Amino acid sequence: MTERIVVVGFGPVAARLIDELLPAVRGGLVELTVVGEETEAAYNRVLVADLGVGRTTAGALALADAAALVADGVDVRLGVRVRRVDRARQRVLLTDGSSPGYDRLVFATGSRPMIPNLTGLNPDPAAPVLPAGVTALRDLADAAALQAAVAGDKRVVVLGGGVLGLETALAAAEEGAAVTVVHNGPHPLGRNIDRGGGAVLAASLRNCGVRVAGNARSVAVETGADGGFSALLLEDGSAIDGELLVLSCGVRPRTELAEGCGLSTAAGILVDHRLRAHHEPHIFAIGDCAEVRCPEPDCMVCRSARGPSGLVGPGWRQAEWLAGYLTLLASGVPGEADALPPLPAEQPGVLVLKARGLTMAVAGDVSAEPWDEEALTAGAVGGRARLQVAQWADPEHGRYVKMTTRAGVLEGLVAVGMPRTAAELVQLFERGAELPADRSLLLRLDGPDQAGATATDPERTVCRCAGVSGASIAAAVSSGCGTVAEVAASTRAGTGCGGCHEDIKGLIEKHFQGAVA
């Protein structure tokens, strides 16, 4: 019998799941329906800021072709919302009056931007009301608002010191806009980076033309006579004037549909290691809306589990695994799906910020300071080695590196303004490898004698979002791919956060330089 699968949500993670299920659809194993709230098919939300400053096009952001999916037999419903999930009858009730049935239901509803509780804003999470000139930079309409502001030389205020907010500010400043980043804390990325790295990062932002207002608590949004944004008011009575306010205050998993039909939720929809909702074998969740935390109280992996990562890479890996699992379920071979190894636990994520003139990588816990004996010895119990911290700073030139290790193995890192050192540290962190005994060897990677050097390990992961190695990209280039877009179409590298685009360009240039030689 054909397995009926309904996917709720049509973002980047859902697009990957649908892509992986297409062979089963074409083979008649699966009858697939996808419900998307927006009128457009899936596109890359991570690069909406790039679209807003004119660095890319809406077509380049597209991750799915609705017409092609329909031709393949997928039932695509765009511009339609799910009103309710009827678990008893296994049906999904839609706003257009239809109610498709399902054998397996997948929530890929993603997340929604958090709207701060400021006077002048309606923070209702279900239907926030934002005045003209205020945007959360989440969809194509938001990108158009930013593009108009940048093109019109208007003043842009970014509220929030996270990676996406900083990348938006840097991109807009590069295009000539007057940009101010406002955050409540001593430095940007306060939850991820240490004090020294944060101070160097803030100075580097200013050197890139971005004004930074730290330790600033916002209280209200002021509008002008035309009803549009005119200023952000702060607790100390001061105001930051502007014509566009970009809210970058984090995201919240969209769990309202799951909660409405009685599923267990925490930060996200609670699922086990096979991405099944707790006590509901017919429903699954992936991506930003899913929180992998199995119901077994003695599971050591879940004991230290955190909520959804908010990164596209883990969501894509979940989608690929779930597509294989659902295909095996649809094949009807007894026990074959249950024999599939469960989804591997996701490794700690790496935050990367790349802009012209500023690079930064942060991973792990970097809160300990070199002379803080209490912090260094806190984890040294049961024969476990104490924490060691190596730190180097050159604030004048915007450079900073911090490495926290235990028994020589890297547990946390910060690297600002040191791109080659950052790349090497990230590789060591992801592999759980030991650092060289002489830590200064890593600093020399960004020395003048290494100016033309590039990483030589062909198996290094160039695109962490899609998990694509340098060897795979080189093979695609050798097969005829001559642009980043062509490499992306062939390997999926560069279709996530976009932070690897320069590395892909470098591999393309290296290939053609060799061919010319």
Image (cartoon, rainbow, N blue to C red):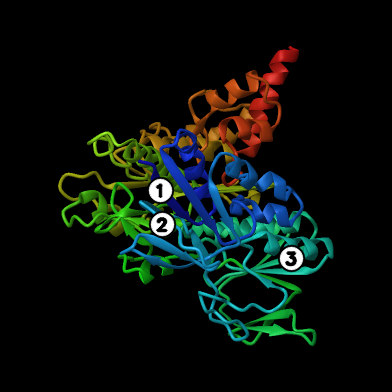
At x 54%, y 42%, the residue is 73
Identity, as a three-letter code, of the amino acid under mark 3? Ala
Query: Dot 2 corresponds to which residue?
Result: 101
> For the N terminus, which image quadrant?
top left
Q: Residues within 10 Å of mark 1 (few under 14, many from 20)?
A: some
Mark 2 or 3, nearer chain start = 2
Decide: is 24 above or below 292: above
Identity, as a three-letter code, of the amino acid under mark 2? Gly
Query: Dot 3 corresponds to which residue?
Result: 145
Decide: is 516 above or below 320: above
| Left or right position of 328 against 10 | left
Mark 1 or 3, nearer chain start = 1
Q: Position of residue 409 (x, y in %)?
A: 34, 38
Mark 2 or 1, nearer chain start = 1
At x 57%, y 67%, the residue is 160
Q: Position of residue 96 (x, y in %)?
A: 55, 66
The answer to which image quadrant residue 163 occupies is: bottom right
